[in-house]
Image: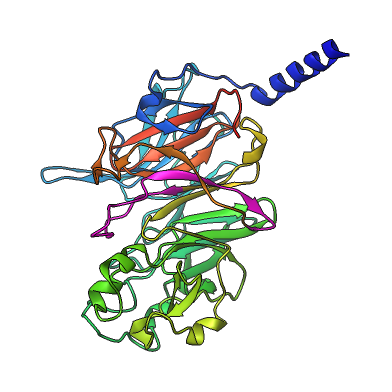
Amino acid sequence: MRLLAILATSVAALAFTAAPNAVTPPCAADNAGLKLAAGFCATLFAESLPGPRHMVVAPNGDLIVALRGVRTSDRTTPGGVAILRDADGDGRAESRNKFGEFSATEVRLVGTALYTENGGAVLRYALPADASAPTGAPDTIVSGLPSDRSHTAKTFLIHGDNLFVNQGSATNVCQDQPIPERKSQEPCPELESRAGIWRYSATKTGQTLASGERFATGVRNAVAMAINPANNDLYVMQHGRDVLATNWPKLFTNEKSAETPAEEMFRVSRGDDFGWPHCYYDPELQKKVLAPEYGGDGKTVGLCATKKGNVGSFPGHWAPNGLHFYTGNALPAKYKNGAFIVFHGSWNRAPLPLQGFKVVFQPMLQGRAAGPFEVFVDGFYSVENNKYTELGGRPMGLTQGRNGELYLSDDSRGRIWRISYVGPATP
């Protein structure tokens, strides 16, 4: 009986670690600079890319990457889309093919239709199976999206015939210029075309802003979007507002402003209003409160009691830019249907050290965050020294490969890593 049990355990382990057609490349000795959760390893899949942001893996294993582009004092390298291919399975792309010259953050693949965006429009290319480049110029699915001032990236996802587009706010809190103790506009004109999720058809061409439906409102900016396979609903991560202490020094200390508001995970349904610019989520009070620009004092709830709440909250000013619900079988069972969140890192936590710059894993239960998150990838920034490490960079996007592996992009230093599980186990 003991021998049978050992054999059964061995077979189960083989089934767990080896997905069909999986090829596990040799890991870099130092995991290519990353600090990873126990049992994981990494290779540097690609480097010297002009601002790699969100990614998607094609059925043949090619990694398709949106490129934002890079601008320096003496040179501008345009963005677009790149198709990276690892033909020999060694964990590093040997070939790359770039097309387009526009700033892109999002890519999605539906059959042979490759979707991307340029800040003002969503585009669709025809990409035949196994092709390393699209055939012909793109169709314009929707154009005329608001792209002036801040939050210009039009991240999106496709769910059935629905094209859900994040149309981020143009301002911090509906003010053209942040002036201390200045009230904001009421009603906020941005809400007519921004600060929410809009729905368009994913298949019709020639749509405009007027063609769309304001599916949900009061979302300041949601770079990270995903469908949760556990309930088939739309989830987004909101970037919270800034400068509470700068604008309202009589109400907030710099330390309070550094930690407030929390970044939030929203479960989005048609007609939802999450409260921006009138409300923000205070992690200490654990509730939405009225913004001082609309008469709040840091404690008053007011009309925020009528706004939809979050299903998870995270440290302030960490800048969540990637969200992925894991559906594969190549990682330990605890990761199945949980959320990986990529934090781009903060810029505005003085006098406290900057934070974020990492990937976390958030367990989910019944559509909500369940318990504390776990740090999954780290090493970009030293909180102790309050400066970038030798690795440096800013993690941006994360996607899942066809065999359950993960790919992580860094848009600051132009790198992408392939992350795989090698065992033995995680707690």
Q: Nearer the viewer, residue 319 or 305?
A: 305
Residue 147 percent location from the top left of the image: 33, 65
Residue occupying image coordinates x 32% and y 39%:
380
Q: Is residue 170 magenta?
A: no
In which quarter of the view is residue 377 placed?
Answer: top left
- At 33% from the left and 83% from the top, the residue drawn is 293
> Image quadrant for the N terminus?
top right
Residue 127 seen in the current view: no
Relative side of 78 to 261, left or right: left
Asked whether, in this view, residue 139 is left or right of residue 120, the answer is right
* Position of 304 relative to 233 (above/below): below
Q: Residue furthest right?
A: 1
Q: Is residue 162 left or right of residue 180?
A: right
Where is residue 327 drawn, in percent x and y?
A: 64, 41
Quadrant of residue 30 within the rendered picture: top left
Q: How many marks?
A: 0
Magenta stretch, overall SS: loop
x, y percentage for residue 308? 57, 74
Q: Residue at x 56, y 71 (%)?
A: 309
Is 317 located above or below residue 49 in the figure? below
Colouring method of the image: rainbow
Q: Position of residue 219 (x, y in %)?
A: 46, 70
Q: Quadrant of the C terminus?
A: top right
Query: Is residue 341 visible to the viewer in this orientation of the structure?
Result: yes
Q: Which residues are magenta?
A: 342-368
Q: Nearer the viewer, residue 221 or 335?
A: 335
Query: In the displayed image of the protein, which residue is found farthest to the top?
Result: 3
On the rendered structure, is 247 left or right of 132? Answer: left
Residue 351 within the segment the image draws in magenta = yes
